[in-house]
Amino acid sequence: MPKRHFKIQGEPLLYSCYDDVVFIYIQFIMEDYKFLFKVVLVGNAGVGKTCLVRRFTQGLFPPGQGATIGVDFMIKTVEIDGEKVKLQIWDTAGQERFRSITQSYYRSAHALILVYDISCQPTFDCLPDWLREIEEYASNKVLRILVGNKMDREDREIPMHVGEDFAQRHDMYFLETSAKEAENVEKLFMEIAAELMEQARSKELPRYDTNSPTINGRTTSIGDSNCCSKLS
Amino acid sequence: MAIFRCCFETQLSDFFEPVVQKCTDPGCCCWCCSALRPRYKRLVDNIFPVNPQDGLIKNNMEKLTFYALSSPEKLDRIGEYLYQKAARDIYRRRNGLVVIAMEAMDQLLLACHAQTLNLFVESFLKMVQKLLESTEPQLQILATQSFVRFANIEEDTPSYHRRYDFFVSKFSAMCHSNHTNRDWCNQIRLAGIRGLQGVVRKTVSDDLVENIWEPVHMDKIMPSLLYNMQNARYPISQPGSPAPHGEEDRQDPPTLAESCMRELVGRASFGHIKSVLRPVLRHLDLHKLWVPNEFAIHAFKIIMFSIQSQYSYTVVETLMAHLDDNSTSSPEIRTSIADVLSKIIAIAAGESVGPSVLEIINSLLNHLRVSVSKLAKAEDSARHKHASKDDSTHEKLYQEALINALGEFANHLPDYQKIEIMMFIMSKVPHSEQDGDVLLQSMLLKSLLKVGTKYQTIQLNQAFPVNFLERLLRMSVGPNPDMRLLVNKIFHTLLDRHLNLEKLLKPTVDVDSLKLTVTKSSRLDAIFIRKHGGDIFLTLYESLELPSNTVENIEAAYTTTALICIELVCEESVCDLLRLIMSIQDLALTSSKLSLHQKYQLHAVVASLLALVPHCVPLSSLQTYADKIIATRIAKAPYLLPPLMRHYDSTTVPAGDVLLDQPQITSCLAEAGLDATQMARPHTGSLQHRHSWVDSGMGGSAAELNSMEVDSVSSSPGVVKKFPEEELTFESLKRILSPENVESRKEADEEKRLRLCETYRSASFTELVQHTQSKGDILNDKLNQLLKGLATKQTLRYLSERRDTERERERDDDRKSEADSEEERDHFDRHSPHSHSRSHSSDHLPPAPQPLYETLFPELFVY
Ligand SMILES: Nc1nc2c(ncn2[C@@H]2O[C@H](COP(=O)(O)OP(=O)(O)O)[C@@H](O)[C@H]2O)c(=O)[nH]1
Ligand SMILES: [Mg+2]
């Protein structure tokens, strides 16, 4: 009869060196990607964060979905220079009241996408507040990208150069997008993936946790499933 | 412009396997290659049906399980292979096959020995993660179930390398599901909560595995649980009762989230509490859940009831710190937080010991102090029309909430600590009488009262440590009537051992109908009243002298006296009480400061107290006498009876048989076999100076008398006078002062008082001052004359004798109190009867030499 345990607590046993070696090996062969990056989207409610993520991960522009509550999660594996890169995308709620939970996701982010709505001045005016939040809760090495979304809209309030200036002043990448028209969305994420990979290769990438062991010290090429990625 | 690219499966198992697969459809491909495939792969392939609807092929699963058990070294590869298959199926949305793969994983997990599990678990978790990454609710839920199953297994060798970040992040996100289908939404949230519970169970016992208590996790877990809890109509149900078993089967997120929270908090050790509470407070802040605070109370009760009790104090501390952080928030928010505090503080009280108790009290008092000064400022600016009245109302509510918290806390402490707390609070009461201080004083006294009401007095000497009693007494004659009222209320609650307080709130002469509970006072009570009775009665008298007294003040003083009568007075001390009652009547008759209304009120108090005394000490003739007085008053002067009124129409100055007559009372005492001569003796030194019959009808103040005493001693230092011991009785002294005999005196008094009243009504203030001064002068002259005639050579001899007898008496007292506590004896040793009966007044007077006639007429001071 197999030995089963349903007790919750127990004394930890010593973990042998042998097991450790075996584990690392197994971890390697099981990954179906070489890089794992965590991307977090922030910005006022309604600027189109969720739409951007949906457009990128599912290729669609969702009709009238409710406002995001707390955090939403999506995954997408892309290929850059022949390497599999898995992007974990955390889409946060813009509302103030969810700030406590959303901030806790900043910490482990490799990239932070700060989104505003080019047709809505207040969403742009809030950017300094968001930067302060990022400053406080995210790693200082985090890759920061400013995105002016809804570029398809006619009633623009923020000229592109204003956004650009802001980004430059705060040492951020800048891009205008349209989730609706699928404009620059792929580009946004692919460039993030490429940049992060670049950083990882030059070992600049902060090691937040060991959940992405494949980033470091892999030489063997990884076996993967016959998974297909859509590339731009 | 999007292109699709196929990535062919290239196995690292190049090392292990000679075959490189180019497989797009495992269904066919694997079949054709099966001969070349290793046995474990074939076994795995065989568990999958051709048609996914048919489900796992049970026979083949058994074969796979048997194989895994007999060749555990293959387990890791089986896991890996199953995972690869599932990953493919997920991508192709063949969910039926994914479900089967997961089921197989589950079965293997449960079947295999713990020792070999480690290798398998990694692919198992990869699989779970893969499913969680899918956008399909169904797969996410399935994955969670598997994860929970895994979480319930205790691994022999925990994997220190394993990280649960992703799971915490993902499960937390699931807890916030916003799925458009309500049912899915609910299910995903439930799965999220279960998942979190699983992670907690898996990691909580061993920080090395994954420190789940890190803020990075707690900041996700706690808000996720709270978010689900707050959406319920949280029940009124006792949060103290443990959650019923089988709660996992319950289908609503709030209940599940709650039980998960209990489990989590229950496992928190001291170092973790901060990181558990911080996100809770932030969540409540951000979701604006303080006002109204039902949910905050609910959440904090859950925390208090599940936290290991030795840490419950930390929760209180943290909440208190949050109050600090909110010092600039609106008073409503602070009130709500303080209210939450008051709701949970009791739970902590049972566990708090030593310094932490006073720390909590001190912190509450500090908040109170800050609020008081804030209120003072607010009212100041309100006066200048800057701020709304609203603000200060809310600030006051906040103060009430703080005091409630204090009371709740004290309520659950053992009684000895309540005393400590009361003394502690008392030590914080400012002495000065400035405006700001008065507010603080009253707040602190209210706190003190709150604690006092929770205290169950057994021994009065324990309830009133000397310092505490002295401070209370001093404050009971302070300048502010509201404060005096509070002090009296403190006395009430501490004195009232037999739950008579409610019945005695208002003076009444119908004592029978009150159904008072009276028990014979104990030996210790007698000692207490002997030690402190003088001070207490004197202070009560002094408090009634104050012209600023409201009806409430006078009633409160009555209640205090009545409670003392019931709780403490015995045959031995009844004389003192009757003396006080007579003094009050004299005050009502002679005071130049009190209004006519106040005087009537005092008469009513006198009648009520007189009626009460025979109920406490068996004095049947006094009962008769009291009945007679009351009957007379009913007939002739109902305004001299309770209830106390703010305004009286009558202007009659009472006289004659409506008044209490001292000789008659004396004879009542004598009839009961009590030492009637005692009645003729003042019951304390200080009261005697000022308020015995001696000075009835005269307006001289204590200060004058005292200075006179000092003068008379110093002016005749060497003069040794004859002491006519046998002649000098109290009566003789009285005769000297008021030449008329008692009967005629009464009539004369009446006339005099009528005249006085008339004068007081018509005369100017300066005239009055002159009038009273001249009276004082007459007394001074008379006393001087008397004393000069009295002092003799014998004085010195007498003094030394007296000291001896005094010492003897002390020794006697000591013997009597042998049964008492050490502390009790201490007090006896430190305070000779005289010194402590005078300690009250000596606070504002320089230590004067013993008053001359105290030394001359020692029998007047028999204690
Ligand atoms: N015109 C236009 N509307 C957009 C675009 N992206 C989002 N929206 C709309 O903006 C609203 C809010 O989008 P949502 O993704 O929920 O914003 P979030 O709160 O930042 O996640 C929705 O009504 C979307 O249809 C865009 O690129 N162009
Ligand atoms: Mg959104």
Image (spheres, coloured by chain):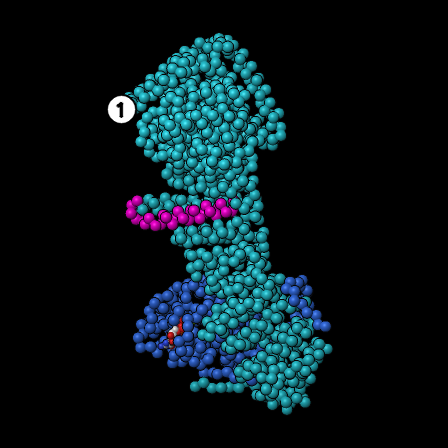
Residue, x 38% and y 79% (percent of image)? A180
Question: Quarter of the image holding residue B434?
Answer: top left
Asked if residue B732 shows in the view, the reply is yes
Tell me where residue B598 appears, x and y as whole percent.
36, 30
Tell me where residue B340 appears, x and y as whole percent.
47, 53
Tell me where residue B230 appears, x and y as whole percent.
47, 62
Question: A126 or B317, which lies in front?
Answer: B317
Secondary structure, mark 1, is helix
Q: The chain coloured cyan carries which letter?
A: B
Q: Main structural element of the magenta stretch: helix, strand or loop?
A: helix
Q: Give the extent of the magenta segment.
A: B383-410
Amino acid type indicated by mark 1 = Ser
Count residues near mark 1 (Cα–Cα under 10 Å), then give few for <14, some for 14-19, many for 20+. Answer: few
Residue, x 61% and y 71% (percent of image)? B149
Tell me where residue B764 appears, x and y as whole percent.
27, 24
Question: B741 or B71, which lies in front?
Answer: B741
Q: Quadrant of ligand 1?
A: bottom left
Q: The chain coloured blue carries which letter?
A: A
> The N terminus of chain B is located in which quarter?
bottom left
Name the chain letter of the residue that bears numbered label 1: B
Residue, x 37% and y 66% (percent of image)? A126
Q: Among all residues in the image, which is located at the extreme bottom?
A: B32
Relative to residue A119, is residue B365 drawn left or right? right
Residue B399 is inside the magenta segment: yes
Question: Quarter of the image holding residue B509?
Answer: top left
**What residue is pinned by disc 1?**
B762
Question: B604 or A125, which lies in front?
Answer: B604
Vertical placement of residue B103 versus B695, above or below = below
Question: Total number of numbered labels?
Answer: 1
Asked if residue B431 shows in the view, the reply is no
